[in-house]
Image: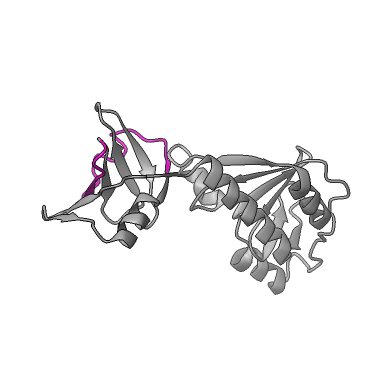
Amino acid sequence: MTEDVESVSVRFYIGYNIASGDVISDVIPSNTMEVNGEDLAKLSEILTELSKITADSDSEEYGHIIYDHIMDYYELTINDDQVLCIGDEYGVDISSGEVFAVPEELFDTVESLVEDYSRNNIYKSLGAEQVTVTNMDGKEIEITDPDQLEMLKSYEYYVINADAETFEEEKIAYVMDLHNGDTLEVHYAGVTAKLNHAGGTFEYVHIQGMED
């Protein structure tokens, strides 16, 4: 499918596949990373060995792959013009519509690159040395267990593109006082929170399963 790979970039959303992320991209940021060095060499070798699935496009087998097994977790742009969407089993060439099997090594390599990039460039952590949690009933709990405190202070989140109007209807499940001038308002039954800073500024963040 690809004879010569000179460049590869990976587009992704944290916590969402490409199609779902594109729908809410006004709030959830799309991220793009360039692959370089040994990582590019490794991906180049794998990508040049991809081959399309030759099943009849009208067959039940092909339909089963298209509708049940293709998930666009990552979008790869090769040489600035060829775009592949890949899942953990199958992928599709956006321009040609050709479907191909995704080798485990390809998916694992891309996933690892994305995780490293996110950890180094996107994720932030609370970093608090003291945390007090207030629940919806107003009960305050001082977190004193060392393991629980370490888990909370190192919990990874990322900033999203939203203002107060976006989440004005959200109920607050917990308020975390970080005792450094910041408080985190964890939204009920959601994956977002409002991080209030000393001085009155704030930002909305994606926190995945912190409420649980």
Residue at (11%, 55%) from the top-left corner?
139
| Image x and y of residue 104, in percent | 70, 66
Q: Nearer the viewer, residue 150 or 62?
A: 150
Quarter holding residue 112: bottom right
| Image x and y of residue 64, in percent | 65, 70
Quarter holding residue 194: top left
Q: Nearer the viewer, residue 117 or 187?
A: 117
Query: As drawn, which residue projects farthest toward the bottom?
Result: 60
Side of 132 relative to 203 (left or right): left
In this picture the colour scheme is one colour
Residue 179 in magenta? yes
Q: Magenta region: which residues?
A: 158-180
| Image x and y of residue 9, in percent | 69, 42
Q: Is residue 12 visible?
A: no
Quarter holding residue 149: bottom left
| Image x and y of residue 58, in percent | 73, 67
Residue 70 in magenta? no
Q: Quadrant of the C terminus?
A: bottom left
Q: Relative to 126, say whether 102 is above or below.
A: below
Q: Relative to 70, say whether 122 is above or below.
A: above
Residue at (80%, 61%) from the top-left corner?
52
Residue at (56%, 41%) from the top-left corner?
31
Side of 133 relative to 117 (left or right): left
Side of 69 relative to 141 (left or right): right
Side of 58 relative to 185 (left or right): right
Q: Quadrant of the N terminus?
A: bottom right
Q: Nearer the viewer, residue 81 or 118?
A: 118
Residue at (41%, 35%) from the top-left corner?
161
